[in-house]
Image (spheres, helix red, strand yellow):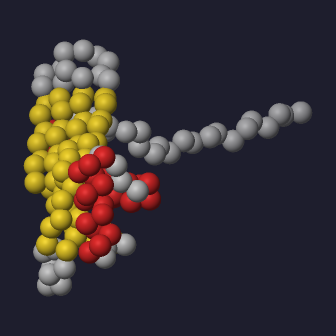
Amino acid sequence: MAIVGFSFMKVGVEKKPLVSKEVKVTNDLKLGKVELAKRNDFSGSDAARFNFEFKVVYGDIGNIDLAGYLLYADEPKKLKEIVETWEKEKRLPALLVQQVLNAILVKCNVKALELAQDVGLPPHFELPKLKMSLPAKKEQK
């Protein structure tokens, strides 16, 4: 149905003195508990709460740790089914996984990029860059 809420519960960044010239950057996203929750708006209806942890590790020079949750609204019967399936099998419908993980990744990547910039760590993914091409030289006769 729809994503109706998102919140960070933990935001942390650490930069250590540079030890090596080459830094391997890795990131990881893990879904934790999936549970039924009340929405924080005035509707009072139920939602599925997807708890997550997102980490960016800059080798031995730093790391970024984010944790929080995403709220997903749907019919109560479907929400109950989603939570029960997760509890039993740690599995979710493919389209739901795609929607939830992409929404979490967008928010976390933007926040991690901001935090990295604040403490002087490099971006954790390749940013678009402008490339100029010089016009071809004309042969003179």
Residue drawn at x 12%, y 34% as measured from the top left:
14
Instruction: Report the front residue among 72 and 131.
Output: 72
Q: Is residue 80 above or below residue 32?
A: below
**Residue 134 shows in the view:** yes
Residue drawn at x 69%, y 41% as measured from the top left:
135
Instruction: Report the front residue among 81 and 55.
Output: 81
Residue 85 on image: x %, y % = 30, 55
Q: Quadrant of the N terminus?
A: bottom left
**Residue 106 shows in the view:** no
Q: Is residue 100 left or right of residue 8?
A: right
Q: Is residue 31 above or below residue 2?
A: above
Q: How many marks?
A: 0
Q: Quadrant of the C terminus?
A: top right
Residue drawn at x 12%, y 47% as measured from the top left:
11
From this viewpoint, which residue is outermost toward the bottom? 42
Q: Quadrant of residue 81?
A: bottom left
Residue 50 on image: x %, y % = 23, 57
Residue drawn at x 26%, y 49% as measured from the top left:
88
Q: Is residue 40 left or right of residue 2?
A: left
Q: Quadrant of residue 48?
A: bottom left
Residue 10 on image: x %, y % = 10, 49
From this viewpoint, which residue is outermost toward the top? 20
Residue 136 on image: x %, y % = 73, 38
